[in-house]
């Protein structure tokens, strides 16, 4: 059996009175992530981890922020498209481990819904998806609530 690991990272600026979508869940908060799509930092990091593991470049290569097809689109769709790209090369997702770094809002109450969204998009069990969150202890751009960061690692295997 052939396996590979991938690493993903994403960051988005936070803006007042902007929707905050993380893991396909819209969070109640006075700020939200800004980007070309829905700016779902978690799903973008996961897409990059998966694409990297399969040696398929990165999310910006496949879903350019200059392409109107992707403007405002749900990142759940980007994740589904990423999984199709992997399947075309004979890869399937084994598991995902992800970390969010932000000061607020609290993520823990939303993790089960995020896991469900990701599992449904990929076609794996929620048991295969770990999501954690931490703060930046009020330091840096994350600590000042100017941005949000996500990291993800994944395992993929030949189908």
Image: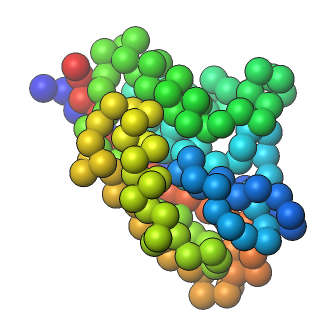
Q: Is residue 65 left or right of residue 5?
A: right
Q: Residue furthest left?
A: 1
The answer to whether residue 146 of the structure is visible from this angle is no
- Observer-nearest residue: 141 or 67? 67
The answer to whether residue 85 of the structure is visible from this angle is yes
Residue 43: % across, % down: 54, 45
Give the vertical position of 20 relative to 156 (above or below).
below
Q: Specify the color scheme.
A: rainbow
Q: State the quadrant of the N terminus.
A: top left
Q: Is residue 3 left or right of residue 88?
A: left
Tell me the residue at 57%/70% (across/down): 101
Residue 44: % across, % down: 58, 44
Give the vertical position of 63 relative to 89 (above or below).
below
Give the vertical position of 91 relative to 94 (above or below).
above
Residue 66: % across, % down: 84, 27
Tell me the residue at 64%/55% (across/down): 26
Q: State the quadrant of the C terminus.
A: top left
Q: Residue furthest right?
A: 16
């Amino acid at each position: 059996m052939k396996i590979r690991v991938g690493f993903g990272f994403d960051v988005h600026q936070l803006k007042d009175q902007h929707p905050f979508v993380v893991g396909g869940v819209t969070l109640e908060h006075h700020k939200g992530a800004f980007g070309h799509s829905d700016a779902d930092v978690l799903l973008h990091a996961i897409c990059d981890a998966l694409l990297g593991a399969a040696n398929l470049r990165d999310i910006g290569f496949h879903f350019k922020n200059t392409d109107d097809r992707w403007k405002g689109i749900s990142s759940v769709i980007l994740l589904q498209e990423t999984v199709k790209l992997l399947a075309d090369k004979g890869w399937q997702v084994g598991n995902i481990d992800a970390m969010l770094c932000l000061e607020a809002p609290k993520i823990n109450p939303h993790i089960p819904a995020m896991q469900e969204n990701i599992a449904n998009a990929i076609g794996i069990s929620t048991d295969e998806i770990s999501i954690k969150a931490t703060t930046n202890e009020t330091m840096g751009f994350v600590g000042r609530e100017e941005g949000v960061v996500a990291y993800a690692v994944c395992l993929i295997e030949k189908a």
